[in-house]
Each structure stands twice: as structure tokens, then as C-alpha cells.
Image: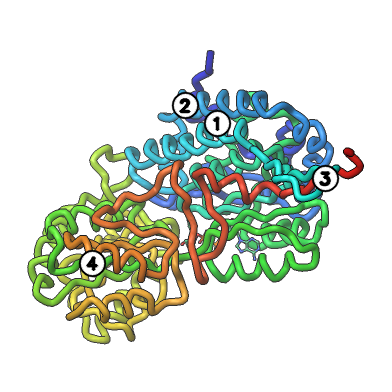
Amino acid sequence: MTQRFELNDLIRADNFIDGKWVAASSGKRFDVTDPATGKVIVQVADSGPADARAATDAAARALPAWRDTLAKDRAAVLHRWHALIVENADALGRLISLEQGKPLAEGRGEVMYGASYVAWFADEATRIYGDIIPQQARGKRMSAIKEPIGICAAITPWNFPLAMIARKIAPALAAGCTVVGKPAEDTPLTALALVMLAHEAGVPPGALNLISASRDNGVAAVADWLEDGRVRKITFTGSTPVGKYLAKESAGTLKKLSLELGGNAPFIVFDDADIESAVAGLMAAKFRNGGQTCVCPNRVYVQSSVYEKFADLLSKRVGALKVAPATDEQAQIGPMINARAVEKIERHVNDAIERGARALTGGKRLTDLGPNYYAPTVLADATPEMQLSCEETFGPVVPLFKFDDEAEAIRAANDTPFGLAAYFYSQNVKRIDRVSRALEAGIVGINEGAISSEAAPFGGVKESGYGREGSKYGLDDYLSIKYLCQGGLE
Ligand code: NAD
């Protein structure tokens, strides 16, 4: 039997350490606000290094017993957690929408997406196999076994408050690791609710600890984990500059890192594509979460002969999107996460227009709706000099670049330090083979805009990071290989 909670029952304002809800040791708190209105939802613990240390102490105490728990028993706990998440999908989805702003249907969708990783890794926990190595010498046996790496620190962004942390906690616990975590300051509530459900599901005290913190105090709290030799792994999703900082600062204790960082995804439409389905694919890939996803197409390259047709179809679809708060069931695009995010979008669009781009639709804030709304926008005549060509805009803006041939499109697509996702549309099988191999990205969508799945390896190349989440590879990041060599057997 699972248990169903109401939205208010899921709201927690304290840290979760060693199986207990505790205030920050300083007693400080900070505001969590609704991005649709700017109003305070609740004040949560503003933790610092002492709280991070208490979380690590708890995780260290819990590690020996959790590591030795039978794989099938760890799997059973994770399956119970999955069932609780699914049972509470509606309330969790509302909580996501409340603190993050995405439309309700997307909030619920994120819950099911995050839950799918919990179920996946529950199953994977029972499949952590090693190898018996073929005998190399008489009287000598060699094997390789996989062991949990130890305490993992999980640090997550605000754009998917449930899915990003679920896909770190689930593999860590499945592998037999214990966890300390800090969600983004904009969206700590969903992560705290998730941890509450994990506790209900039977994750033992200390195996999973979560602290919340404001931006500045969070940096100091995480610094304690970076320096602590007991923390053996950092699993981070967020921006590339912060990922680089974590890699540098954790070098003193040589931790294993998984870094899921920023992207600058190209989306290429060749003249042999099914144009209607390319438009549909772009709408799905670009406008999820109002364009605030790491795999969002950021640069759209369209072959000259189909450019006008594509731009026309696309702007009609984009212009018809319903922008509204998540409280409106019809909403397709919600508010951006905060004022900083809207300012960045505005800066990118203004820079593009000053450099010759044309707004086919949108191109402005929607101040009537609230402080953080921006109109879904299509910009024609984009060029590589524009800021939005080099940086993630992280908002509902589609810049259209024109190209003449395949080589030019590939060169432009790869002309970025990032390499997370890339997409292209073509009906030519030879081209599909060539372009899939030529694109420098960890994930390639071919005639498809919806690419995420718990069964697939998610992650980037170049400055989009390293490590993979989901799939049969996802557990490797939380395991180390031990080689056993036994002699004297003959
Ligand atoms: P961010 O890097 O600013 O913050 C991410 C997390 O790191 C937050 O919890 C934040 O508090 C923390 N943080 C920030 N500075 C820190 C520091 N100096 N020390 C320790 N912790 C620190 O990113 P964001 O704005 O929250 O998220 C958006 C970014 O995340 C985008 O670049 C997006 O592409 C990326 N992202 C990547 C993926 C992926 O899977 N590759 C998924 C989602 C988001």
C-alpha cells in the first residue's frame, strides 16, 4: 500500500539529515518564491558548511550498512520509492509548477519522467555484475568486482527540480552509495518532498541527506564537500562554468566527477526533410519548459530552398502558443525562472535585432502577465556573430540561420565548445548516416525532437561535460572496479 499526500503535506522547510528534519545550524532561512507572481511560498533552511559537514557525517555512518544491504533489498526500497512518487504525481507536479513555473501538464510529466529513472535503477541494482577473467597462469584466479564508490554529493539545477535529482539519487542508492545533496536555491521544495518520500519508502537514516541553501551560502556548503576526502564523488548538473569550478576545486581529493553541463544544441533542417514533421519536432524540443532545458535547440539551421516555408510554418505555430501561469490548465509556456533569466533573453534578442535579425513573432516581454514572462519568439536572419549563436539563451527564442550545403551546416553546428544534444531532419538515408557521425554531440535526435529516456545514455562531450545518466551505463559512474588476484591454488 502506498500513501497519498496533499500538496501542502509535501512542503518541507528544513534540511533532512540522518533521517530527521533539522533547521540550518545558523538558524538562517531564505525565501522560495513563485516565479509567476514573485510571491514567497515558504522560507527554507539557509545552510552553510556546518550543515554540509553534518550531512557527510551521517552519510559516512550509514555507508557500511547500506553498502552491505543485499542488492535485491536495495532494489525493493527503490521500487517502493518509485510507487510513492507515482502515487503522488499530481501533488508533486503541482509543487514543481508552483516553485519552477512550468505548466501543470509538464510538471506531472516531469514527475513520471523522474520516476522512470528510479524504477530503472531499482532494476539495475540487481544487475551489477563483475567478470571472471580467463585464466592466465596455473594456480592463479583473477576476477573483477564492482563496488559502490562511497559517499556521493549531488548538486542540481532548477529547470527540472525532480528529474535531475532523482536521476542522481536513484543510481547512487542502487549502487550502494550514500548521498549528500543540495538542490538549486530557486527550487528546493520538490527535492525535499522527494527525500521525504524516499524516507517513507524505507531508505535508512543517513543514506540520503539533503540541505538547502541560498546561492552564496550554498557555495560555502558545497566547498566543504569538495574538500572532504570522505566524499568520493560529485555528480553535478548545471552550467559549464560551475562544472569547471567543481572539477578544479575537488582535485585536491581526486574525486570522481559526473558533469552534465550546458549545451548549445544545433537543429538542422535539410531540404530533403519532411518540413511539417521538422516543425513539429522543433516545437517539442524547443518549447518544453519554456525553452529552459539543456537539450533545447538553441541554433536552428535551415537549408536556403526551404527556409521561407519553414520560417512561415514555424512562426504560425509559435505565435499560437498560450503563455500563462501554471494555474491556467491551458498554459503551454509559463514564466521564466527569475528576473536574471528574462534579462538574459532580452539581451540576446536585442543584440540579435541590432545586428540585423528580424522578429517574425514575439521579441518582447509580456509584462501584463507578471514579472518573468517573455513572448515565444522566432528570429529570422540570425548570424554567427550574435550572442545567441554562442551562448545558451535558455528561453523561448528560436533563431533561424540559413545554409546552402551539408558541409556548411555541419561546420556551423560543430562550431561551439559545447556538445550535448544535436538534431537534424532529413529523409536521405546516406545523409542520415554521414551527419549522425559528423555531429560533435553526446545525443543526436534524427527526425525526432523528444530524445530523453531512462533507457538511453544521457550526457555530453566537449564542454558539455562527461559521465552518462540513465541506461545500462548510468550505474558505472557510481561504481569502482576492484581486481582480485588469488594465487597458490595449485
Ligand atoms: P548553475 O550552474 O548556476 O547552478 C546549478 C547548481 O549549482 C545549483 O544548485 C547552484 O546553487 C549550484 N552552484 C552554483 N554555483 C556554485 C558554486 N560555485 N559552488 C557550488 N555550487 C554552485 O546552473 P542553473 O542556472 O541552476 O541551471 C541551468 C544550467 O544547467 C544550464 O546551463 C543548463 O544547460 C544546465 N543543465 C544541464 C543539464 C544536463 O543534463 N546536461 C540538465 C539541466 C540543466
Q: Tell me residue 311's x, y (percent).
A: 13, 67
Q: Name the residue tied to disc 3.
A: 138
| Residue 283 appears anywhere in the view | yes
Mark closer to the chain start, 3 or 2: 2
Question: Tag 4, which secondary structure?
Answer: helix
Q: CA distance from mark 4 to mark 2?
A: 45 Å
What residue type is disc 4 on? Arg
Q: Secondary structure at mark 1?
A: helix
Q: Earlier in the sequence, mark 4 or mark 3?
A: 3
Name the mark nearer the viewer: 4 or 2.
4
Q: Residue at x 44, y 59 (%)?
A: 338
Please name the residue shown 53% across and 53% down the image: 468
Confirm if mark 2 falls within 8 A of ligand 1.
no
Q: Nearer the viewer, mark 1 or mark 3?
A: 3
Mark whose residue sits in front, 1 or 4: 4
Contact check, label 4 and label 3, Cβ < 8 Å: no
Q: Earlier in the sequence, mark 1 or mark 3?
A: 1
For the point 57% across and 31% down, the residue is 122
Q: Is label 2 in a helix, a strand or a loop?
A: loop
C-alpha gap between disc 2 and disc 1: 21 Å
Work out which quarter of the rendered image holds the C terminus and state it: top right
**Which residue is labeled 2 in the image?**
88
Classify mark 3: helix, strand or loop: loop
Image mark for residue 431? 4
Check disc 3 and give the amino acid type.
Arg
Q: Are marks 3 and 2 in contact (CB under 8 Å)?
A: no
Q: Residue furthest top?
A: 1
